[in-house]
Image: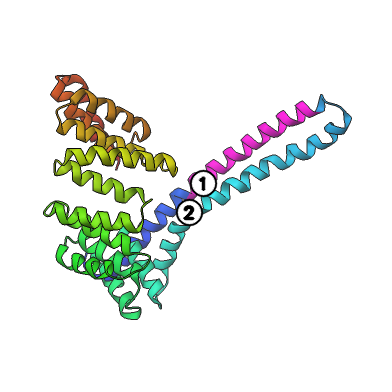
Amino acid sequence: MNDKTQILEEARREAKEELQTLQSRINRYSFFAIGTGLGIGFFIFHFWFKMGFIWSMLAPFVGLVMPFVLYFGFRSRLAIILAPYVIAVESLEKEPQTATDYANRASAFNDHEFYDAAVDDYRTALALEPNNDYVQYSLAEVLWLGLHQEDEALAIVEKLSKTEGEFQAEAFALQGKILAEKDSATALNCFDKAIEIEPHDYEHHLLRLRVYIDSEQFDRAVEAIKETNKLLKRHNGMHYYSELCELRGLLAMKQSRFADAVKELTVAIRHCPLAVEHYRLRSDAYEALGYTDKAEADRRKVQELGSET
């Protein structure tokens, strides 16, 4: 699909469908919040009514207010989730004027895999604001992940990593990801610099750990696992715990400790049951242990999750 008008129409249609789907889910959850509030309100009314006249006078008020407190509180939280989808639709419906307009539309194009259109809009945004670090980083990311133009992406992040700013650490990290397979030593140096700038960023630590494992630097990997585990616990980053468990499982597989790998990957699946890679790795570990039925069950799960995605 090369015509920009067609791309715009298709991206707009997809973005609106996503927004409508999410809005319908929010409406369902909102009604659930009201029902929960009514249940809690009824319980409070019943409990306070038994405690005497003064409390029973307050009970109807609480019983009526509680559903609305839960409803508006719930919707305000979900509105935060909804905001990026609203911005995406708005950016695709209006003619961009500013660098921010073009960057928002480029992000929407990227989300719907129209990478060439995204790159065009990011370049236009940079023409309007040449020193916009966010746009430079976003352009590099699309060039690498979407269009596989590694050299240009690398040139952008190398330049960006030399400039102190909000995206300096992210630039080092992206540079490390681009180089990880072909130059692990330089990639690790990039991750070290990213961690030096942002020592509490979990992703930088996990990226470095993965390179340690892939390059078979197992002693460093073991130390990095301990360090990352402490970081996640200390700074409330347990939502990254499934990835850490996956990497511990991967390390165990590299060291032919397949039973340990199964244990680690089972914990990873418990924390994140929709991650395809967890099941794929565990199927390999089961296969190595001779548990062909369990390996096959995990492979079926991989196919099932892949088709849903």
Residue 8: in magenta span = no
Left or right: where 109 falls relative to 238: left
Vertical comparison of 309 with 268: above or below: below
Give me the disc on residue 82: 2
User: Which of the two marks, 2 or 1, is nearer to us in this view?
Assistant: 2
Vertical comparison of 188 with 261: above or below: below
Q: Tell me where residue 132 sits by quadrant.
A: bottom left
Say whether residue 10 is visible.
no
Residue at image point 52% right, 49% down: 78
The magenta stretch spans which residues? 23-48
Q: Earlier in the sequence, mark 2 or mark 1?
A: 1
Residue at image point 26% right, 68% down: 119
Vertical comparison of 209 with 196: above or below: above
Left or right: where 52 falls relative to 232: right
Q: Tell me where residue 34 sits by quadrant.
A: top right
Colouring scheme, one of rainbow, by chain, secondary structure, one colour: rainbow
Mark-to-mark CA distance, 2 and 1: 9 Å
Say whether residue 93 is visible.
yes
Residue at the left extreme, as displayed? 182
- Residue 127 pos. (x, y %): 30, 80
Q: Which residue is mark 1?
A: 26
Give me the disc on residue 125: none
- Residue 170 pos. (x, y %): 31, 60
